[in-house]
Amino acid sequence: AHSPPLSASSKTAPGPSSSHKSQPLLATRTMGKKSKKEAKPKAVAPVDKTPEGKKKDVSQAIPNEYFPSYVEAAWYQWWEKMGMFKPEAKTEAKSEEKFVMVIPPPNVTGTLHLGHTLMCAIEDALTRWHRMNGKTTLWLPGTDHAGIATQTVVEKKLMREQKKTRRDLGRDKFLEEVWKWKNQSGSHICRQLRRLGSSCDWTREAFTMDEKLNKAVKEAFCRMYEKGLIYRKERLVNWSCRLQTAISQIEVDNKEVDKPTFFSVPLHDKP
């Protein structure tokens, strides 16, 4: 007759007489386990030693891993120094055709986001393609003053840092603060555009409040007025009590009410 199968207790807790038999079995099981792979040490990116503005030294050994900071280093500074993005740049097959494009100027109030990156990639590809075809090519860079948005950002900054309003400073002092903010934020945006490899001619960088562009805007409005394309009349406007100026419809949040309702109004004590 067959012997009965071992019970669970006899498998897991053998008696003293069988302990010497179970030890080799346990050792065999332990040795059979796969040891976990040790984590590889994180590779350190090599340092590019090319002097600023010089052509990149590519004689060094190529790293086994891809390091964007190493691969992209030095190239843009050399391109810019050599004037490769200027319309005057010489090409082998120069034609009489021209390709000129103005970059949609980003607002100086912030930093570039993914939408700007996509836009720059497409426009840069177009510019480089026309340049490679021998055309006189100009991709004009610049930033937009973003009037009301910039004013709001600077006013918040003044209140946070100095506990003052623009009226406390006066017009001239407040404009100085706006220009400081523009130089700080605008330069950051332009550095981001350079990091993207945008082939813009930075010697022609523009700002929508530059004196030259300011005159151009005034001239455009005068011409449109003379042609009857724009007119001046008394009309309802969206007046901001806080900003003390008219704002566009896109900057208004409408709130519908079904009965006479009191609202708190900025700069007014009573609703």
Image (cartoon, rainbow, N blue to C red):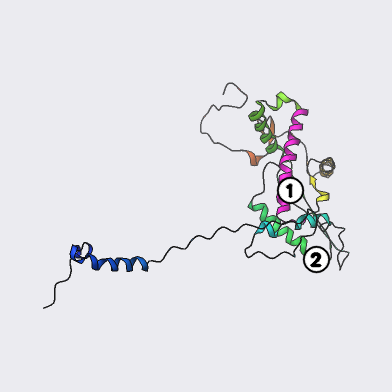
Q: Is residue 85 above or below residue 219?
A: below
| Residue 150, horizontal then vertical, whole percent | 70, 37
Residue at numbered disc 2 = 132
Looking at the image, residue 91 sits to the left or right of residue 66; the answer is right
- The span from disc 2 to disc 1 (Cα, nearest Å) is 24 Å
Q: Quadrant of the N terminus?
A: bottom left
Residue 39: in magenta span: no
Looking at the image, residue 234 sits to the left or right of residue 11; the answer is right
Residue 189: in magenta span: yes
Amino acid type for the residue under numbered disc 1: Cys
Q: Secondary structure at mark 1?
A: helix
Residues at discs 2 and 1 in contact (Cβ within 8 Å) = no
Q: Residue at x 79, y 64 (%)?
A: 130
Q: Residue at x 84, y 40 (%)?
A: 211
Residue at numbered disc 1 = 190
- How would you classify the magenta stretch by its main secondary structure? helix
| Residue 156, horizontal then vertical, whole percent | 65, 32
| Residue 129, horizontal then vertical, whole percent | 77, 64
